[in-house]
Amino acid sequence: MRSDSLLPATWLAERLAIDPGRIEAMRRDGELIATREPGSTDWLYPSWQLENGAPLTGIQRITRAAREANIDASHLYIILNARRGLNGAGYVYELLRAGRDDEVVELVRAG
């Protein structure tokens, strides 16, 4: 995992100026993507899913597609942090940041 881009829930709650319990609810509801380090019980949140202090609008669509495809949080994180194309032209999550949700949904469904 690229832990340099992962934020603990407490830090994210402070950054978004909301209660830490709300962060957990947002994760469960698919409004935020989170992953865990192997052997840890703490959720970590990729910083790339935030823009102007709020989650990207496509996050819920992506998490819904993952759930429909029975993809767990750790695997979803791996998919979104994968390099695109054979020549490594950026990361999948960059498509999400660019508003190209349809492409990301297809990649998630392909697992």
Image (cartoon, rainbow, N blue to C red):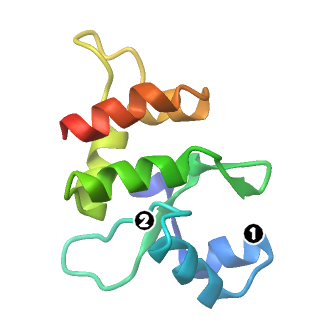
Q: Which mark is residue 97?
A: none
Which residue sits at x=30%, y=59%?
Answer: 67
First-in-chain label (2 vs 1): 1
Q: Is residue 1 visible?
A: no
Going by the numbered disc 1, the residue's amino acid type is Arg
Going by the numbered disc 2, the residue's amino acid type is Ala
Q: CA distance from mark 2 to mark 1?
A: 16 Å
Q: Is residue 40 visible?
A: yes
Q: Quick one: 21 or 89, which is closer to the camera? A: 21
Question: Is 37 situated left or right of 30 in this image?
Answer: left
Residue farthest along the top direction in this orientation: 87
Which residue sits at x=50%, y=32%?
Answer: 101
Which residue sits at x=77%, y=56%?
Answer: 53
Residue 15 at x, y percent in the picture: 75, 69
Which quadrant holds the C terminus? top left
Question: Is 32 situated left or right of 41 in this image?
Answer: right
Indicate whether 12 appears above or below 22: above
**Helix, strand or loop status at disc 1:** helix
Q: Quick one: 3 or 33, which is closer to the camera? A: 33
Q: Looking at the image, do the residues carrying marks 2 and 1 touch, with CB atoms under 8 Å apart?
A: no
Q: Which mark is residue 15?
A: 1
Residue 32 at x, y percent in the picture: 53, 63
Residue 92 at x, y percent in the picture: 40, 31
**Helix, strand or loop status at disc 2:** loop
Question: Is 42 situated left or right of 23 in this image?
Answer: left
Quarter of the image for residue 37 reads bottom left
Other residues around mark 2 within 10 Å, as few (<14) / some (14–19) / many (≥20): many
Indicate whether 79 appears above or below 26: above
In this rendering, which labeled residue sits more in front, label 2 or label 1? 2
Other residues around mark 1 within 10 Å, as few (<14) / some (14–19) / many (≥20): few
Q: Which mark is residue 34?
A: 2
Residue 21 at x, y percent in the picture: 60, 90
